[in-house]
Image (spheres, rainbow, N blue to C red):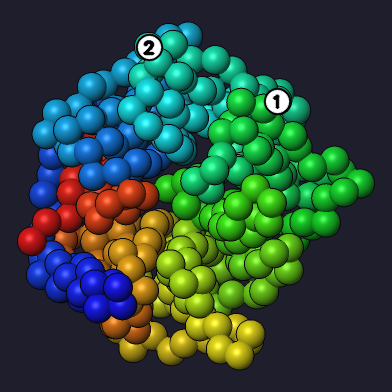
Amino acid sequence: MKKIIFLLFFFCAIQLVNAQRVLQLTNNGKISLRGLSVVNDNIIWASGSNGSVAKSIDGGKTFEWITVLGYEQRDFRDIEAFDENTAVIIEVDAPAIILKTKDGGKSWKEVFHDDTKGMFLDAMDFTQDGNGVVVGDPINGKLFIATTNNYGDKWVALKPEDNTYSASEGEAFFAASGSNVRITGNKYKPGIFFVTGGTRSRLFIYGQPLDLNIVQGKETQGANSVALDPTLTKIAVVGGDFNNDSSSKNNIQLFIMKNKQLMNATVQTPPHGYRSSVIFANENNLVCCGTTGVDVSTDGGLNWKLISADSYNSCAKSKNGTSIFLAGKNGRIAKLVN
């Protein structure tokens, strides 16, 4: 069994080393896609502006484009899908709304609605057994957090008196890729990780904040995305300055868990500019993307190679497979290929 696992890991590593091309699969006019969820190697969901959702059930060969009725002018910044019929999308503000479909996108039901002044939902994540979290910008100085334990059918927001997630002035989340929050474990012992940006950029681990060495201080700066490797011993954080997206200065930070201590790892060659999304393909292989291109790393994130200069907002790996997809402006959806 150990030999089989090693061979599978080696094959995935070789695949990423040889993956030197981003293959564009589709585009759709002026739609900007930021939400991306890959259920398996065949089922892909994406969401974005103009009330748009895209779905493929054949590995990206064809896509069905869905306009959510009644929400044609809304911007769905994140999506989480569970199969070809079931998905959850968030509409960021005015009011903040979460919708769910159980019939493949034919109909959608509001499962969360909040018109509190200042509400702005940014990202969400789920475990495989339906435990989920959604994060939003601060309300009265507290980062907004809501959770679900039934695949998003019902959401419960942290009460102000129970919310210990205080935000500094000008600190918030970015709704750039739906990947600044991750939830691990199961419904009995979930672990929530998220990153903030703006005037202050921090990584929160199990409720404990850690200041990041990511460029920060302005509303366009800070961390945009966080990823955990499958062994939960490595953490990658990417970001930068959206208004200076060609700069690689302090756009990434890596952590390694050693002897129950979180240690900083020194990046030798950073990604090539502002990056809004990062994922682990496996323990040592990573992908990140942003407005100035797509990078890959085969050594745990220490060195990065630019493989495309095309702009993408989000990247995601199949939850039950090996495929990696990307989504971005002009309705572009792409796949990482050899």
In the rendered image, residue 74, in percent from the top left (x then y), is placed at: 47, 22
Question: Along the horizontal axis of the image, is 57 left or right of 124?
Answer: left
Q: Which residue is mark 1?
A: 114
In the rendered image, residue 182, in percent from the top left (x then y), is placed at: 54, 55
Considering depth in this image, is 312 or 6 the residue closer to the camera? 6
Question: Along the horizontal axis of the image, is 39 left or right of 253?
Answer: left
Q: Quadrant of the N terminus?
A: bottom left
Q: Please, what secondary structure does the residue beneath circle 2 have?
A: loop
Considering depth in this image, is 201 or 243 the residue closer to the camera? 201
Tag shown at residue 56 = none
- For the view shown, which residue lies furthest in the front direction? 1
Amino acid tagged 1: Asp
Question: Along the horizontal axis of the image, is 147 left or right of 8?
Answer: right
Amino acid tagged 2: Lys
Quarter where residue 298 is shown: bottom left
Q: Residue at x 11, y 34 (%)?
A: 61
Count of marks, rendered view: 2
Q: Which residue is mark 2?
A: 106
| Distance from Cα at disc 2 to Cα at disc 1 | 24 Å
Classify mark 1: residues with Cα within 10 Å, few (<14), some (14-19) or many (20+): some
Q: Residue at x 69, y 51 (%)?
A: 188
First in residue order: circle 2 vs circle 1: 2
Q: Quadrant of the C terminus?
A: bottom left
